[in-house]
Image (cartoon, rainbow, N blue to C red):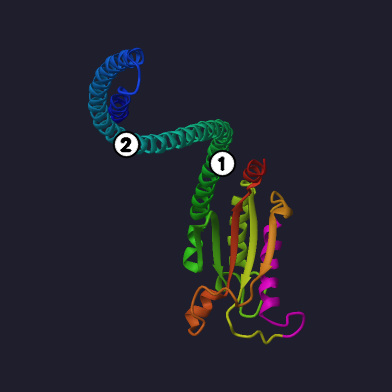
Amino acid sequence: MKKIVLSLVVLSVLSSCVSSKKYQELDDKYIKLRSENVELKDQLDTLANKSLKCQSALDRLTIRYNSLKSKYETLDKLYTVKDNAYKKLQASYDALSKSSSQTLAYEAEKSQRLLKELEKKQQELAKERAALDKQIKKIQSLESLIAQKDAKLNNLKGSLNRALNKFKGQGLKVTQKNGKIYISMENKLLFDSGSWHVKQNGRDAIKTISNILSINPDVEIMIEGHTDNVPYHGKGAIQDNWDLSVKRATSVVRQLMNNKNIDPKRLIPAGRSKYVPVADNSTPEGRAKNRRIEVILTPRLDEIMNLLNN
């Protein structure tokens, strides 16, 4: 605008100095310029209005942008939190899935192993059961054999008691214990003091015993000689109670061998001296009970032993 006004002033000053034609040209230019100036002013106003509208729109867009930016930042933070949580959850899930798979595989393997062990145990149990059945049959056979032996032993004891009844008041008694029969005969029935020669009454008792034993061939016969604790003071081949107990046992064996139906292999003499007393050696009565011969009858256990060994 300042340039236009200046131009007008200059024209006014120069108008007096120029010709009409020149003036007219300048006036035409002026009018043209003024017209252009008006147009420019209108354009400028239009642009100013547009600028205001644009600025207003820009302000609104800026406000909207800032609002959206704030919301975006909030959402971005929330997304970051959720994303982190998701990643943790995913990691936990992956770990759990892997662990579950490993656990499942382990449990499956463990089940397979246990199943194989169970099958092996069942096979072993079947073998053990078969062995047990075999053992039960063997035990039943043993029980049957033992029952037969016990029955025979009871019958033998009954026979001896009946046959030896007349000697029982003379220091003879028959007992049964631990699967054996014991015929105990005190020395007053068999020997004089310090002697190992069997008296007549003793020979009669031994003969009665031998008759019973001859018809019971499945019985082993052990003859034990026992003394009291009084030292032997005799002379000759006998030195002490050991010799005396053995000598007396041997004498009874010889009497039993008079029965030809008794196999000598069944006879076992033994001396026990004073070391297996049955009464107190401090009294005469006790010493009398300790001076004795014991005939111990044991059933042969060949069948039982064979069964056990097999």
Separation of disc 2 and disc 1 at Cα?
Answer: 98 Å
* Residue drawn where x is 41% and y is 36% of the image: 87
| Residue 237, magenta (yes or no) | yes
- Residue situated in front as seen by the camera: 41 or 145: 41
For the record, the magenta segment spans 235-258
* Residue drawn where x is 69% and y is 64% of the image: 269
Q: Is residue 23 above or below residue 169?
A: above
Q: Specify the label residue 119 is tagged with.
A: none
Identify which amino acid the numbered label 2 is placed on: Glu
Relative placement, left or right, of 46 versus 271 is left
- In the picture, the quarter occupied by the N terminus is top left
Is residue 197 among what the camera can see? no
Residue, disc 1: 142
Is residue 205 among what the camera can see? yes
Quadrant housing residue 209: bottom right
Closer mark to the observer between disc 2 and disc 1: 2
Q: Residues within 10 Å of mark 2 (few under 14, many from 20)?
A: few
Quadrant housing residue 92: top left
In the image, residue 239 lies at what x, y percent?
73, 83
- Residue situated in front as seen by the camera: 204 or 114: 114
* Residue drawn where x is 64% and y is 56% of the image: 221
Relative placement, left or right, of 235 versus 223 is right
Which element carries disc 2, helix, strand or loop? helix
In the image, residue 171 lies at what x, y percent?
50, 69
Residue, disc 2: 73
* Residue drawn where x is 36% and y is 37% of the image: 80
